[in-house]
């Protein structure tokens, strides 16, 4: 058994496991270096690093660019074991408390089953029949996860009418899906009272009814218009399991995009979803204390109020704050807010929208020419491509990188190119995008397009 299997059993995805193994063997590397080691994009590497940092398996430096490290692989496994042990301990404590409550209750029906009931349904027709039954029996709520093509199957079965009828009766029904241009019209068949949201992270399918019964798909036929003879789903009648599944769905639901907004990508040919910007992971309270020159440690118990000390410290804080006000945009870095990073993320979104508007251009050379024309027409600089030593795009900014206190618009400009290329050439495709820092004084950076086909054929 290898480390990948152990880390996977401990709850890490394949990408996260590979990242941990790479970092434990080669610490203190940049995200771009990790992406190269793993054969993926820098954005993909950042996504894995973000979660690994959140659970404490990866640390990063505060310099630019950030460098990432992980403890030796043995220590990582021990940390994951401790996390799982703590989770099991909490489950055991809650279970004991639940048993105590049940024993003390005098109103429990003696015929109430204590064990969860499981069943495996095979073939789509039987799964949809069970969903229809759940819609008919629902008393409070029904939440459906439909993935990309689930709405297509739903609308071709009697379960759709049962779901719409339940919504009309006042049952709270929500649908979490991944919208697709081929299926978006089917959502019009849902009752207006049913709330629909879109998430790119949704691939699986499932249903939770009244936090008591759950359907979790085990297999779904790849052909969306097939008969689903190989479809299989697990049906679980368990409040505990339903509650955990609903919590997972709720977490995705909170970050999902309302249907009216997400559907504009297909109905109005525009990307208008909210743009979520990210900042570095850190303690912003500690940053604030440093910036305002608060040197005293925070008390962990109540302390007597001292008016004199309070007024004196207040004057110091105000003075430090006044100094920040005259610092302009550069002062934001004191709080860990990197304007360059934020503008690059905005540029990535603009680039994504640009690539989306050019999506009907099939040839890659034709796409690159149109993208370059737009970038240069906007006055952002000038782009050119060459095939030596490999196919690449040279980026020359319209204005030099400034070190003054103005907006670092170069990050926005470069982010547009990066966003357009990453949107056009998704990870795992025939073209891999690799960014390199400037080669000389004139060239700001270049993007290597590593292709599986010859340049003249792209």
Image: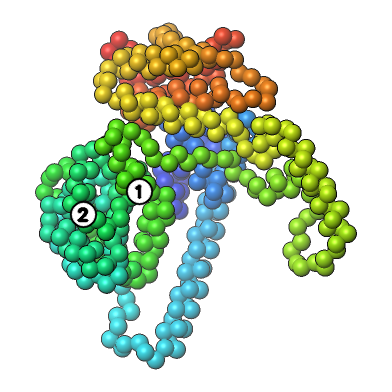
| Helix, strand or loop at mark 1 | strand
Toward which corner of the image does residue 70 lie, by quadrant? Answer: top right
Using the numbered discs, state the Cα–Cα distance from disc 1 to disc 2 in whole angstroms: 15 Å
Q: Does any portion of residue 76 appear in the rendered image? A: no
Which residue does the image show at 41% across and 10% down from the upper left? Answer: 385
Which residue does the image show at 23% across and 43% down from the upper left? Answer: 184
What x and y, as percent, mark residue 162? 17, 63
N-term-proximal mark, 1 vs 2: 2
Report which residue position mark 1 lands on. 258
* Picture layout, residue 272 above or below residue 446: below
* Picture layout, residue 453 above or below residue 340: above
Which residue does the image show at 30% across and 14% down from the upper left? Answer: 366
Q: Name the side, left or right, on which 414 lies relative to 218.
A: right
What x and y, as percent, mark residue 422? 40, 28
Residues packed near mark 2 inside 10 Å, few (<14), some (14 to 19) or many (20 plus): some
| Quadrant for the C terminus in the image | top left
Report which residue position mark 2 lands on. 190
Which residue does the image show at 74% across and 33% down from the upper left? Answer: 326
* Picture layout, residue 109 above or below residue 117: below
* Picture layout, residue 164 above or below residue 401: below
Q: Name the side, left or right, on which 234 lies relative to 313.
A: left
Cβ atoms at labels 1 and 2 below 8 Å apart: no
Q: How many marks?
A: 2
Q: Does any portion of residue 96 appear in the rendered image? A: yes
Which label is found at residue 146? none
Q: Name the side, left or right, on which 226 lies relative to 380.
A: left
């Amino acid at each position: 058994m290898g480390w990948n299997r152990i880390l996977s059993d401990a709850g890490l995805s394949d990408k996260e496991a590979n990242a941990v193994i790479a970092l434990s063997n080669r610490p203190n590397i940049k995200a771009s270096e990790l992406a190269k080691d793993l054969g993926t994009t820098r954005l993909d590497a950042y996504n894995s690093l973000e979660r690994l940092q959140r659970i404490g398996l990866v640390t990063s430096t505060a310099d630019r660019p950030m460098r990432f490290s992980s403890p030796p692989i043995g220590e990582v496994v021990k940390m994951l074991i401790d996390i799982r042990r703590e989770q099991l301990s909490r489950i055991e404590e809650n279970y004991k408390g639940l048993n105590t409550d049940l024993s003390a209750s005098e109103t429990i029906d003696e015929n109430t089953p204590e064990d969860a009931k499981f069943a495996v349904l095979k073939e789509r027709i039987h799964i949809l029949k069970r969903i229809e039954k759940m819609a008919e029996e629902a008393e409070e709520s029904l939440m459906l996860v439909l993935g990309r093509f689930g709405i297509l199957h739903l609308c071709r079965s009697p379960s759709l009418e049962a779901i719409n009828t339940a919504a009309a009766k006042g049952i709270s029904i929500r649908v979490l899906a991944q919208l697709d241009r081929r299926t978006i019209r089917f959502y019009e068949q849902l009752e207006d009272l049913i709330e629909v949201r879109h998430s790119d992270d949704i691939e699986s399918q499932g249903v939770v009814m009244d936090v008591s019964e759950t359907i979790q798909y085990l297999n779904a036929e790849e052909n969306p218009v097939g008969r689903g003879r190989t479809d299989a789903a697990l049906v679980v009648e368990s409040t505990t399991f339903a509650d955990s599944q609903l919590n997972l769905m709720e977490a995705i639901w909170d970050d999902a995009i309302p249907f009216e907004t997400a559907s504009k990508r297909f109905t109005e040919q525009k990307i208008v979803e909210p743009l979520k910007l990210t900042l570095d992971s850190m303690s912003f309270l500690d940053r604030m204390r440093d910036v305002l020159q608060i040197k005293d440690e925070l008390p962990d118990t109540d302390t007597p109020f001292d008016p004199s000390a309070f007024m004196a410290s207040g004057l110091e804080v105000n003075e430090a704050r006044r100094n920040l006000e005259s610092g302009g945009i550069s002062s934001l870095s004191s709080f860990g807010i990197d304007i360059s990073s934020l503008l690059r993320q905005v540029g990535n979104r603009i680039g994504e929208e640009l690539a989306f508007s050019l999506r009907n251009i099939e040839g890659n050379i034709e796409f690159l020419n149109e993208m370059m024309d737009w970038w240069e027409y906007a006055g952002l600089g000038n782009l050119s491509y060459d095939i030596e030593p490999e196919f690449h795009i040279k980026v020359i900014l319209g204005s030099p990188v400034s070190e003054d206190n103005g907006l670092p618009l170069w990050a926005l400009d470069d982010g547009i190119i990066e966003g357009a290329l990453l949107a056009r050439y998704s990870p795992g495709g025939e073209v891999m995008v690799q960014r390199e820092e400037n080669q000389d004084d004139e060239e700001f950076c270049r993007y290597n397009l590593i292709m599986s086909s010859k340049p003249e054929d792209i």
